[in-house]
Image (cartoon, grey):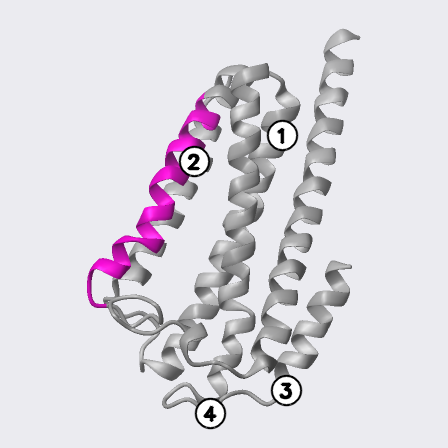
Amino acid sequence: MAILLLAYTIIAGLLIDVPRLPILNETIRGLFFHVTMWFGMLIMLVVAVVYGVRHLRTGKLEDDDMAVEFTNGAILFGVIGISTGMVWAKFTWGDFWTNDPKLNASAIGLLMYLAYLVLRNSLTDVYQRAKISAVYSIFAFAVFIPLIFILPRLTDSLHPGNGGNPGFNAYDMDSNLRMVFYPAIIGWTLLGTWISTVRVRLRRLERKLEDKLINQ
């Protein structure tokens, strides 16, 4: 399902007619990749937080497996999303990176989650690692959301929907964009979920193998 939706996103996203907006023109097709990947990332981070809370309640490593792998998947989507955004920025703003509040906030947010990985790798006890990681993940998410959605709206920003700029939904009444945009969000989210769950199964198999070797 995810592959079909993403194939549709790529093909339809390249072929459909798009609104001819000033400066953006054809580059508005980046909306189908840059923005939708970040929506998928946010959904995966919500899943990670839910399983982090579950681990704090149950103490089960299975919940930690889900939390860490959905966070890993979200980080991957975040890095790819910000990279595609940089390419889009080069064509529309003239530079890969500008001193824009939303760009800077997004970079800070990704660094927070990269610090999450560093924190996990610095702890050797599996239960301590799982518990501390869960707490960190919850607080990181609580900071991440206002960092990328609220703070950029309080100051000047080049991004649509921030700093007084209208959002895409204010002027893209062309339904063609929505026909690709929403399936793309679902497709990226399903792909991220598939990647994460495969890694969860691998992580659990590795733990079972380690337990068997220890018990021999």
Which disc, if any, is residue 16?
3
- In front: mark 3 or mark 2? 3
Give how far apart the Cα atoms at labels 1 and 4 are: 45 Å
Give how far apart the Cα atoms at labels 4 and 3 are: 12 Å
Amino acid at dot 2: Tyr
Which of the marked residues, 3 or 1, is nearer the chain's N terminus?
3
Which disc, if any, is residue 33?
none
Q: Furthest residue to the left? A: 155
Give how far apart the Cα atoms at labels 1 and 2 are: 14 Å
Front position in the image: 148 or 78 = 148
The answer to whether one can see residue 203 in this image is yes
Residue 129: in magenta span: no
Give how far apart the Cα atoms at labels 3 and 1 are: 40 Å
Image-based side of 171 in relation to 166, left or right: right
Amino acid at dot 3: Ile
Residue 147: in magenta span: yes
Mark 1, residue position: 65
- In front: mark 1 or mark 4? 4
Which of the marked residues, 1 or 2, is nearer the chain's N terminus?
1
Residue under the image location 51 percent in, 19 percent down: 56
Quadrant of residue 191 within the rendered picture: bottom right
Q: Provide the secondary structure element on which disc 2 rests.
A: helix
Which disc, if any, is residue 116?
2
Residue under the image location 55 percent in, 32 percent down: 50
Which of the marked residues, 2 or 4, is nearer the chain's N terminus?
4
Front position in the image: 90 or 92 = 92
Region in magenta: 132-156
Q: Quadrant of the N terminus?
A: bottom right
Q: Provide the secondary structure element on which disc 3 rests.
A: loop
Residue under the image location 37 percent in, 42 percent down: 112
Which disc, if any, is residue 20?
4
Q: Furthest residue to the top? A: 215
